[in-house]
Image (cartoon, rainbow, N blue to C red):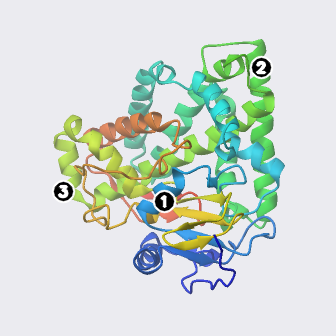
């Protein structure tokens, strides 16, 4: 295949940092135009990275069909050269992304080792505790009466669940969650607080890695009934995880386990307020509706907005020639509003079925390992909120600036 070298940047640039400071609806207007007119488009390198990009640009994929195609073809669109829009050093990549930024066969081997410890049975051990924790969180919300919904509710259940499963000392859980927030917020002025993006990212990564290494060493010498003990003991075909691999997984689960579920809770709660008839539908028949409702809340929130892949061989996508070494960025938020797949995509429909959302990724080998944990947490917290805080009133959310996580920093609430 002959790959064209004369590439013109699309005028609707989605790699300007200013673009990711706009509202979701403003960004979606751009994505809708791209879906209709240029579903595979060429854009300059992402602004605001931690080091100058060596890429000439990035292909942006906005349609649902194409996001799934890229996700399900890891031989052509690989993850081992990074999954974010910014260039990062190789040592930082492996330390911060674990098997998320690995390809076959290493990805499969690492995922199998982690899966041996991260099982549904492991979650079932603490299901009753998750229920009790959700109840305790809403108790505290009712006692407070008003405040920041993110601090009072959204961040607490995911943080508790992830670190309770891991067995992490409660005394350091807030610190670990704070470092995880820094990992995804290095383009936000509040998070930067006058520092450089690379400085913020490096400090957060080193802090989490050191915590993970110390925790793994402690559990190796003092085993318990928890996920970290299972990780240091897990063995598949005679192979065990190294300390560095365990620490990298600790970083990954701290970020993925905290931020994605937290933001689905925040954005989902606001969506239920904005669509009161849907809220009433769920409240009146919670057990009958929550199954499809959870998937719809994930589609609506799209808590992970983007991932990127690197092309391993000259190829084409929707007739557009793409060269070996090019970057391809998948827009999950755009795919989840694609009118070609979702009827009335701008309406919340808790009975939507089928619902092939890409809230956990577009399928393929990198599909979210902990999806069932996230769904269980969403079920339990909304069960409590709808039955015990029926008059919950939420203000406008304040969003994190960045291209990776659709983060809600603050959202005022009254009960």
Residue 230, placed above or below residue 320: above
Q: Residues within 10 Å of mark 2 (few under 14, many from 20)?
A: few
Residue 191 visible in the displayed image = yes
Q: How many marks?
A: 3
Q: Secondary structure at mark 1?
A: helix
Q: Which callout, 2 or 1, points to the residue nearer the camera?
A: 1
Residue 323 occupies which quadrant of the picture? Answer: bottom right
Task: Measure how far apart labels 2 and 1 are at the Cα level.
Answer: 41 Å
Q: Residue at x 70, y 49 (%)?
A: 80
Residue 302 pos. (x, y %)? 45, 56
Asked if the residues shown at circle 1 and circle 3 are in contact, with their CB atoms under 8 angstroms apart, the answer is no
Residue 54 occupies which quadrant of the picture? Answer: bottom right
Q: Residue at x 52, y 24 (%)?
A: 119
Q: Which mark is residue 210?
A: none
Upstream in sequence: badge 2 or badge 1: 1
Asked if the residues shown at circle 3 and circle 2 are in contact, with their CB atoms under 8 angstroms apart, the answer is no
Name the residue beneath numbered marker 2. Answer: 218
Residue 174 pos. (x, y %)? 64, 39
Upstream in sequence: badge 1 or badge 3: 1
- Residue at the front extreme of this rendering: 1
Upstream in sequence: badge 3 or badge 2: 2
Q: Secondary structure at mark 3?
A: helix
Q: Nearer the viewer, residue 226 or 178?
A: 226
In the picture, measured across the screen, residue 145 lies left or right of residue 155, that is left
Name the residue beneath numbered marker 3. Answer: 277
Q: Residues within 10 Å of mark 1 (few under 14, many from 20)?
A: many
**Quadrant where the N terminus is found in the figure:** bottom right
Q: Secondary structure at mark 2?
A: helix
Residue 370 pos. (x, y %)? 51, 36
Q: Which mark is residue 67?
A: 1
């Amino acid at each position: 295949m002959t790959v064209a070298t004369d590439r013109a940047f699309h005028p609707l640039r989605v790699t300007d940092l200013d673009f990711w400071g706009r509202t979701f609806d403003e960004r979606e207007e751009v994505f809708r135009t791209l879906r209709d007119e240029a579903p595979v488009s060429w854009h300059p390198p992402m602004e605001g990275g931690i080091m100058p990009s060596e890429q000439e640009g990035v292909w942006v994929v906005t349609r649902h069909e194409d996001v799934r195609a890229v996700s399900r073809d890891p031989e052509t669109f690989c993850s081992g050269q990074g999954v974010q829009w910014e260039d990062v050093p190789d040592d930082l990549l492996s330390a911060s992304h674990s098997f998320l930024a690995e390809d076959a066969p290493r990805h499969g081997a690492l995922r199998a080792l982690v899966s041996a410890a991260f099982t549904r049975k492991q979650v079932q051990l603490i299901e009753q505790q998750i229920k009790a924790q959700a109840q305790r969180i809403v108790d505290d919300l009712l006692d407070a009466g008003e405040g920041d919904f993110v601090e009072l509710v959204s961040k607490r259940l995911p943080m508790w669940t992830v670190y309770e499963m891991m067995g992490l000392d409660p005394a350091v859980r807030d610190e670990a969650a704070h470092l995880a927030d820094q990992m995804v917020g290095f383009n936000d002025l509040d998070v930067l607080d006058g520092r450089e993006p690379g400085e913020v990212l490096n400090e957060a990564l080193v802090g989490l890695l050191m915590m993970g290494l110390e925790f793994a060493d402690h559990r190796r010498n003092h085993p318990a009934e928890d996920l970290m003990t299972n990780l240091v003991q897990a063995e598949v075909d005679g192979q065990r995880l190294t300390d560095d691999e365990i620490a990298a997984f600790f970083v990954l689960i701290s970020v993925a386990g905290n931020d994605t579920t937290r933001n689905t809770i925040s954005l989902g709660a606001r969506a239920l307020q904005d669509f009161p008839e849907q809220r009433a539908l769920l409240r009146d028949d919670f057990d009958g509706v929550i199954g499809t409702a959870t998937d719809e809340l994930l589609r609506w929130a799209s808590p992970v907005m983007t991932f990127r892949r690197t092309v391993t061989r000259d190829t084409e996508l929707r007739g557009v020639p793409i060269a070996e070494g090019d970057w391809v960025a998948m827009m999950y938020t755009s795919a989840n509003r694609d009118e070609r797949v979702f009827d009335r995509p701008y309406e919340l429909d808790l009975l939507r079925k089928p619902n092939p959302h890409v809230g956990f990724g577009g399928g393929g080998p990198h599909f979210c390992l902990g999806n069932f944990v996230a769904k269980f947490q969403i079920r339990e917290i909304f069960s409590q909120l709808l039955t015990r805080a029926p008059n919950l009133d939420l203000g406008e959310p304040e969003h994190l600036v960045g291209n990776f996580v659709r983060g809600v920093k603050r959202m005022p609430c009254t009960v």
